[in-house]
Image (spheres, rainbow, N blue to C red):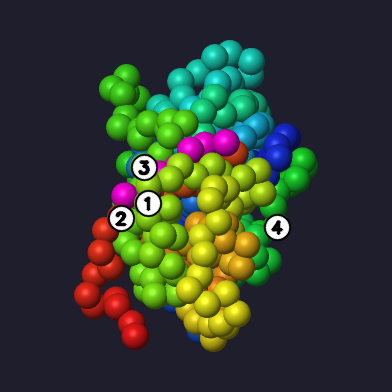
Amino acid sequence: MSHIEILRAGVLTTCQDAGRPGWGHLAVPPSGAADRPSWRLANQLAGNPTGACALETTLNGATVRAHRNVTVVVGGAPCAVTVDGRPESWGQPVKLQAGSVLDAGPAEVGVRSYLAFSGGLHPKSSLGSHSTCLLSGLGPAPLKDGDTIPLGPSPAHPPLPTQWPAPWAGIGEDIVMKLHLGPRLEWFRPEAVAELTRGVWTVSEHSNRIGLRLEGPSLKRTDPAAELPSEGIAAGGLQVPPNGQPILFGADHPTTGGYPVIGVVGPEAQAAAAQARPGTRIRFVPLPMPHWSKRS
């Protein structure tokens, strides 16, 4: 069977596609690629449907051997790319011959790089998705050295070589996110909302695909002793536990929680959060919560 072989799995390399939305009623997170625009663009450049499964690396990349001729695109967080020791282009289609070794090095900025292979990856699926979920354990386990992953059929229209620069999003040390305030705004003191939107928050090292832990001023509740019944949580939700330090939920977020959500960010901010290293500074620009999502 045509496949790739993992020679160096790095800190954390997982299989990710569009995820498994729609299973929240069974407490299954959506998962899928953390930085959706980068994952989608890598697949497009590799000649795949945009929902194809690819590798998502974390910080220090990965090394793979191809066991058939295949085109690979390394995108997302910029990194050095080599094939059999020779430098190749990041963010552009690279042709691998069967037996060749591709190395995606450590991320120069950002966190997550994406390796998209023509034909896509086809590990064992769970609930219709090939995505690894760190919270539920569904999907393929995080990859380790020596693992093999089947490749799908070569696309009918293979990618064309190009030297045109692809529109990869930039990644900086400071991120500004638009934040829709609510739905549990009334659980916080007015000064807490002011601190949230005028302060600078720092990404903690205790962050992962489940969520970014943010460090900054403690956000005080109106009634510290009050308890909120468990309710649904969406990706991009900014939840505040009793210590007052917010958690920005990512792709593998829990589906319910008992702490109030002070705001929600959209898909663009979620993609930026996926590339935020520990120490990255985040600022929030407040927006009103859409009227259709307000709750009493």
Whichever of labels 4 and 3 marks the residue nearer the N terminus, that label is 4
Residue on which disc 3 sits: 176
Is 241 on the left or on the right of 163, as rendered? right
Pick the front one: 167 or 72: 167
Q: Residue type at mark 4? A: Ala
Whichever of labels 4 and 2 marks the residue nearer the N terminus, that label is 4
Report the disc number at residue 141.
4
Contact check, label 1 and label 2, Cβ < 8 Å: yes
Pick the front one: 282 or 209: 282
Q: Is residue 281 magenta?
A: yes
Residue 296: image location, x then y, percent: 34, 85
Report the disc number at residue 286.
2
Residue drawn at x 35%, y 25% is 161
Q: Which residues are magenta?
A: 279-285
Query: Is the residue marked by circle 4 packed among few (<14), some (14-19), or many (20+) residues within 10 Å?
Result: some
Residue on which disc 1 sits: 197
CA distance for labels 4 and 1: 38 Å
Callout 1: SS:
helix
Query: Is the residue marked by circle 3 packed among few (<14), some (14-19), or many (20+) residues within 10 Å?
Result: few
CA distance for labels 1 and 3: 11 Å
